[in-house]
Amino acid sequence: MKKKEKIKLYESLFYIREVQEQLIKKYRQGNKMRCPMHFCIGQEMLPAVLRQLIDKKDSLFCGHRSHGYYLSKNGPLNQLFAEFYGKKTGVSGGMSGSQEMMLEKINFYSGALLSGSFAMSIGDAFSKKYNGKKNLSVAIIGDGGMDEGISYEVINMAVMMKLPVLFICENNLYSTQTHMRERNKNLNIYKKLLPYGIKTSFINSNNPEKCFLKIKNIIKDIKSSNRPVFLEVMTYRFNAHVGPESDDHYNYRSNKEINSWKKKDPLNFYKNKLIKEIKDFENINMLIKKKIKNKINNAFKYAEQSKFPNSFEKFNYQNTYSKKVKNFYNNQIPFDEKQEEHKPKASSPY
Ligand SMILES: Cc1ncc(C[n+]2csc(CCOP(=O)(O)OP(=O)(O)O)c2C)c(N)n1
């Protein structure tokens, strides 16, 4: 990797971590953020890597633990914080909170229905293929999401229809507070997928560079072959399943386990690696920290100063959406005629 790429990767890791930490600090102050939030401290490696490897036109679908992925699509921070404050300048007009945000202009979609991200991604990938676009869909769920039957149906369909999807399971070992081994006999999720005929890959390392290089190759492969790939990435969340306070008092995971993962913290690991490798890294790091802290402070100010939607705007937000849906149905032409008119660049896989 080039020096510039390494620094950008470190910056993304730091950015995602710092946003989480500052949100956690502010969450209870004045009780201004009223939506439930699933933080991703400890899990920054994958979103940081994706930030550098996916294009704006690639779609990203994720679940409830959405912040890192919104930032990996370079979603504006001001709008993100305004959404958490329930303001009309927020990502979804202050109506969705942290779990259900979508921002079409950057092709970012999240949702709390477990495995929904996998399900939606294949429709999106089919439309890309049908319209001859070269971009891919990236869909991320947790190990808990891989307990849902629909994940396997969707992967089967993507294989059969040869769709350009990067399916990722970000395995942090727990579904809420239940460990994998209490839910599954086979602990290697990617191995369960071998019979489906999908290419699989596995990352069990806290070295963001290894993750970067592997995913770079996978994306190249998907774009050239137009076939899906399934990737499992091992990780660990340091914060609670939901909310800013720790949930370790439920004793669902041991201190020994938590500490062993904290020793492998990808942000610390990478910072120490770059200190050794890059002569002026301490200075670079100082500038990065200053820039990001400013950006975060400004985003809090923006969120605080923005207005709440009034009841008409709340109604209108839903109404705009239904108008869009209505227009879609009103403009429908029978499928055969549409095909004639549309002249798809790729043949239908049926
Ligand atoms: C279809 C569905 N079933 C159950 C839930 C409740 N639920 C919310 S989060 C969660 C655990 C998710 O675990 P995982 O997929 O591993 O993601 P993580 O929270 O660890 O990031 C569950 C079961 C849900 N949101 N949707």
Image (tube, helix red, strand yellow):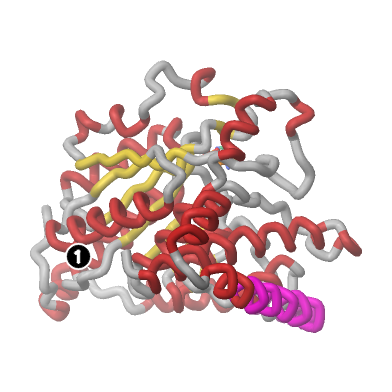
Q: Secondary structure at mark 1?
A: helix
Position of residue 301 relative to residue 121, above or below, is below
Figure quadrant of residue 9 = bottom left
- The stretch in magenta equals 288-317
x and y percentages locating residue 103 in the rendered image:
51, 72
Residue 79 x/y as whole percent: 64, 76
- Please name the residue that numbered disc 1 is placed on: 129
Judge whether 120 appears above or below 305 on screen: above
What residue is drawn where x is 68% and y is 44%? 239
Specify the amino acid type for callout 1: Lys
Residue 173 makes an appearance in the image? yes
Q: Main secondary structure of the magenta part?
A: helix
Q: Going 45% across and 70% down the picture, which residue do you hit?
A: 8
- On the image, the x and y values in percent for residue 286 come to 63, 73
Q: Is residue 43 above or below residue 329?
A: above
Q: Quadrant of residue 320?
A: bottom right
